[in-house]
Image: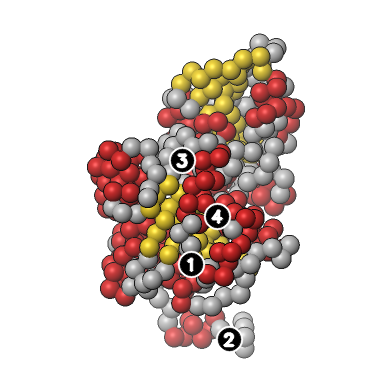
Amino acid sequence: MSKVKDIKLAEQGRLKIEWAESHMPVLMRIKQDFSKSKPLKGVTVGFALHVTKETAVLVRTLIAGGAKVAIAGCNPLSTQDDVAAALAKEGVEVYAWRGQTTEEYYENINRVLDCKPNITVDDGADLIYTIHKSRRELLKNIKGGCEETTTGVIRLRAMEKDNALKYPVMATNDADTKHMFDNHYGSGQSTIDGILRATNILFAGKVVVVAGYGWCGSGIATRARGMGSQVIVTEVNPTLALRAAMDGYTVMPIDDAACMGDIFITATGDVEVIGRKQFEKMKSEAVLANSGHFNVEINIPELEKMSKSKKKIRENVVKYELKDGRHLYLLAEGRLVNLSAAEGHPSEVMDMSFANQALACKYINENKLPAGVHKIPKEIDETVARLKLETLGIKIDNLTIRQKKYLTSWEEGT
């Protein structure tokens, strides 16, 4: 029995899903193939993903392949209630609504696990974490899982290192057709979109501080610069810092950038990236936004301690008045701003990410893998890329026999 905010929103959600399907041609081709071959017949798939129109297309694809699906959200603020209602109306077990408490969030995770999934699909690894912490009886029936995001893969590799991960998980995030596009182009556009929807602030002429220059942070920096901002990048990784410098950005420590920024955006996947030391140096009216998966990158408890009052002044904007009279604005409770204050990544880029997820589920079901974190097979990655090119009407060259031989030999030189 599903639990959603308002089932009456189903028609509105259905129209959103229809829009997404028309902009996700790769996944729709896979859905057609799945409808014929039924590679997931008899398999129960448990989801903890952002319940968006794009996720709904993935859910429909797996169902077309014969799977039973149960889904919970993977963030308290990212569920699109109309999409959740539409899936529930179609008979999918949905346990998600926007504005869940932490307690409700984990109750919904456990409702999905009550369906005894054979495959898990995570964004942030909370399903996997809960199974290993308190639902270990489910391990014997699980064939494997998939992880969608950088934060979740980091978490899973830590589990693997400690020999705590007891079933195989495909690191979907690490597929080239995922992180090079979803993380860079998707995060870049959707993060700026979330900040704009929350604030309607002018980016031109502003100083934007981007913490982290991985695939997500580099995409955000690119989009902010494209809107006329002066972009400062902060990093702990020397190679990424060097790349940011050679891409033309100013690179400096976060402590030095704190007094300069008008807008601060975190995208590191780590904890306490911005805290008291930085808050004390910030200009009044600075805007704080996070694009990482969990709301731990901006130290909100420290911001609360430094403030004498706070009030919600716009949807997804809370104004903190500090004890010295300065004002700082926190967006979307410090949660991932692109999904909490906007709709997340465009359908066109999620097309590739969720194509990887669908094919990874099929691969898990058809192959027995050892426990641990696994790369998406190259053939899946290249299949997704080729399908995307076809749907865009783009043709590429093929290697000749002579060229293939040259690339696999060592005897030819000058």
Q: Picture quarter containing residue 40?
A: bottom left
Of the image marks 3 and 1, the number of the one nearer the N terminus: 3
Q: CA distance from mark 1 to mark 4?
A: 12 Å
175 to 91, vertically: above or below: below
Mark sitting on residue 385: none
**Is disc 3 in contact with disc 1, using a CB cutoff of under 8 Å?**
no
Task: Look at the numbered disc 4 and give the secondary structure of its residue.
Answer: helix
**For the point 54% across and 58% down, which residue is it?**
147
Q: Amino acid at mark 3?
A: Ser
| Foreground tag (3 vs 2) | 3
Name the residue beneath numbered marker 3: 78
Nearer the observer, 244 or 391: 391
Tell us which disc is closer to us: 3 or 1: 1
Kindly identify which numbered label has been placed on residue 409. 2
Q: Earlier in the sequence, mark 3 or mark 2?
A: 3
Kindly check if marks 1 and 2 are in contact, taking CB atoms under 8 A apart as contact: no
Q: Quick one: label 1 or label 2, which is nearer the N terminus?
A: 1
User: As rendered, which of 78 and 248 lies closer to the eye?
Assistant: 78
Can you identify the residue that label 4 sits on? 127
CA–CA distance between discs 3 and 2?
Answer: 51 Å
Q: Specify which label sits upstream in the sequence, 1 or 4.
A: 1
Could you tell me residue 68's position as x and y percent? 38, 63
Mark 1 sits on what residue?
118
Assign a secondary structure to mark 2.
loop
- Compute the Cα span from label 1 to label 2: 44 Å
Which residue is the extreme one toward the top? 325
Tell me what residue is drawn at x 69 percent, y 63 percent.
Answer: 164
Q: Nearer the viewer, residue 69 or 395?
A: 69
Please tell me whether mark 1 sits on a helix, a strand or a loop: loop
294 vs 380, left or right, is: right
Crowding at dot 4, Cα within 10 Å, few <14 / some 14-19 / many 20+, comes out as many
